[in-house]
Image: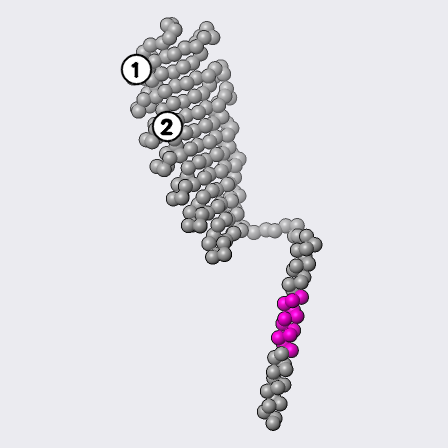
Amino acid sequence: MGNVETRLAALERSHRRQRRLVYVLGSTLVALLTMGATGTVSDVLRAHRFEIVDQGGRLLMTIEARDGRAALELQSEDGQRSALLSTTAQGGALALYDERGHQMLLAGAEAEGGALEVTGASGRTLVRLGSGNASGGALATFAGSGQRLVELGATADGEGTVATFDAKGSELVALAAGSHGNGKVVAYDGGKEHASWPDK
């Protein structure tokens, strides 16, 4: 009989402990929900790195400090980098990547102003749009080999220019303002001026 009483006493103690645990867990949950409902937030939340993961634990986004600069990175479900927003020495930069992790687009601040670069799968720049010099903006297109093909820009006097180049980088044709305020077309051969219209 004493054996049964001992078992009952142990069962009652276990039951009391479980009830206390459920009460503590319930009170904690109510407190958390109440804090969330009242909108209570911390004034400062500090960390070197934040990670956002999906339900399977795959990393999708990070916010962190990298070499003294801020960086926000998005990753695909395959773990490839998709986008990177970061600070740079000149300001800020945004880079977008393809499914293989190759950079396809870069937009950022430079010493002279803003710049935008479109890159091919080879990693070479195909189009570059920038603020150019103090006279105006500049647009350049490039071959897959990296050679400049066409360039739109401005002269030091603020006149618009267009130039085309051959596969070796030598200038072929240029459109610019003439010395008398008129338009001028210049053809080149081997990098040297070959003909111009109107004539000099």
Q: Depth-wise, is mark 2 or mark 1 nearer the camera? A: 2
Secondary structure of the residue carrying tag 2 is: strand
**Quadrant where the image shows the C terminus:** top left
- Tell me if residue 25 is in the magenta stretch: yes
* Secondary structure that dominates the magenta span: helix
Q: Mark 1 points at which residue?
A: 189
Farthest residue, direction right = 38
Up/down of 162 relative to 121, above or below: above
The answer to which of 20 and 157 lies nearer the viewer is 20
Q: How crowded is mark 2: few (under 14 residues within 10 Å), some or many (20 or more)?
A: some
Residue 22 % position (x, y): 63, 71
**Quadrant where the image shows the N terminus:** bottom right
Up/down of 74 relative to 2, above or below: above
Secondary structure of the residue carrying tag 1 is: strand
User: In the shown orientation, is residue 80 left or right of residue 37?
Assistant: left
Q: How crowded is mark 1: few (under 14 residues within 10 Å), some or many (20 or more)?
A: few
- Name the kind of residue labelled 2 in the image: Phe
Residue 68 % position (x, y): 52, 44
The image quarter containing residue 11 is bottom right
Q: Earlier in the sequence, mark 2 or mark 1?
A: 2
The answer to which of 77 and 43 lies nearer the viewer is 77
Residue 169 % position (x, y): 33, 23
Up/down of 151 relative to 34, above or below: above
Residue 142 - label: 2
Residue at figure coordinates x 38%, y 31% from the top left:
126
Residue 163 % position (x, y): 39, 19
Extent of the magenta region: 16-27
- Tell me if residue 26 is in the magenta stretch: yes
